[in-house]
Amino acid sequence: MENVAQLLTRNVRRYFLLILFVVAETAADLCPPPASLAPACTCTTLAEGVGINCRAVRDVGDLLGAFRLVTGPISEISISDSPQLKNFALESLEEVPNLKDLQSLMMYRIVINIPAAPKPLNYPKLRSLNISKNGIRDFPQPLLSNLTELTYLNLSHNAMTAIFPGHFDSLKKLETLDLTNNKLNYLPPLTFQGAPKLRILKLGRNALRDLSSEMFRGTKALEELDLSQNVIRYIPREMMNEFQNLKVLSLHRNWIIDVPGNTFQNLTLLEKLVLSGNGLKYLSADSFKGLEVLTNLDLSNNGLEYIPEGLLEPLKELEVLNISFNRIKSMPASLMKNLKSLRRLDIRRTLITFVPGDIYGLVSPASNVRVLQLLS
């Protein structure tokens, strides 16, 4: 005869299995049968609802119909590679129920129509918004005003010519902003001040020419800044004072011809600096002063003819140095004496014909370097 403890244990087990069955059944019911969805759409059960993925959609009715078939909360929507949906209106999604829990919205390569005076997007839990590659020219300020939980915003590969401070005033939690490959030629003062938690800012492949500290005022939390492939000629020293936490800075393929002394001296946390593909001809001995934790320096594809004495002396943590595709003729051993952490030195396509024997001392048993990869 079962004792009370055994009976209680068995009943608890049955109750637990019943709960699992109900939860599994409920989760399965959140997605409609695959046959009822538009051929271009799939539905996946997620931890916090369902995800709808539609690719190469031809008809707006099919798209919205797929969303309406979902009985549970929709947490992710992805609509991609659907150029047939020309001038798709963002407001169309407001006709879909169950979007109050939407956390991720991706609309990629569709050609979105945004009216001049749009209603704000009303997805209070949205954390990720990707509307890249949609031919967007103008981005009205009110559109994002209700997205107070947004942490990721991708507006890359559009045709925007201007952005303004009001665009980001309500995005207090924004951490990543991607504006790559637009037509921006100017950033007004305080453009990003409304996003105090911004950590990653991508502005590559635009037409930015003149930089100033006012453009980036209020970006103290920034850790990665991409300014590559613009037409920047000069790096303002005072602008660098805004980037107290910056770890990665890319200025690849601009029109910079020199780096004055102390330009980066306040970037004390910088780990990677990319200056490749510019017209660099001159560096001063103090160009990299203050970069004491820098581990990766790329000076490739420039017009450098020599490396000033003392240039690399502050870079005690440097692990990767790329000076390839320059006109440098010699590599004095004294330049390398403080680079105890160096692991990779790229001198391909330079005019260096002799590498001092002392450079190989970096891989001696007394050195902290285990391997030095010399590319020549």
Image (cartoon, rainbow, N blue to C red):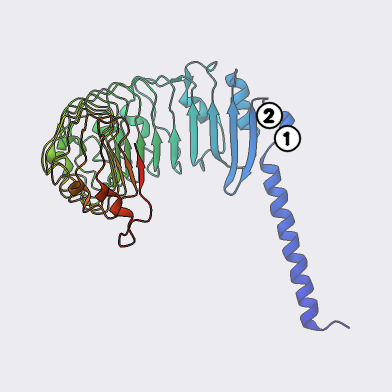
Location of residue 157 (image quadrant): top left
Query: Which residue is located at x 34 percent, y 23 percent?
Result: 117
Q: Which residue is mark 1?
A: 33
Left or right, 334 with reference to 224:
left
Location of residue 256 (image quadrant): top left
In which quadrant of the rendered image does the C terminus lie? Answer: top left
Q: Pointers 1 and 2 in contact (CB under 8 A)?
A: yes
The Cα atoms of the two marked residues, 1 and 2, are separated by 7 Å
Task: Specify the amino acid type for callout 1.
Answer: Pro
Q: Nearer the viewer, residue 228 or 221?
A: 228
Q: Position of residue 311 (x, y in %)?
A: 16, 44
Left or right, 248 with reference to 212:
right
Q: Is residue 294 visible?
A: no
Q: Which residue is mark 2?
A: 37
Q: Position of residue 225 (x, y in %)?
A: 29, 39
Tag 2 secondary structure:
loop
Left or right, 173 with reference to 293:
right
Q: Position of residue 133 (x, y in %)?
A: 44, 23
Query: Which residue is located at x 27 percent, y 55 percent?
Result: 340
Q: Is residue 237 visible?
A: yes
Location of residue 120 (image quadrant): top left
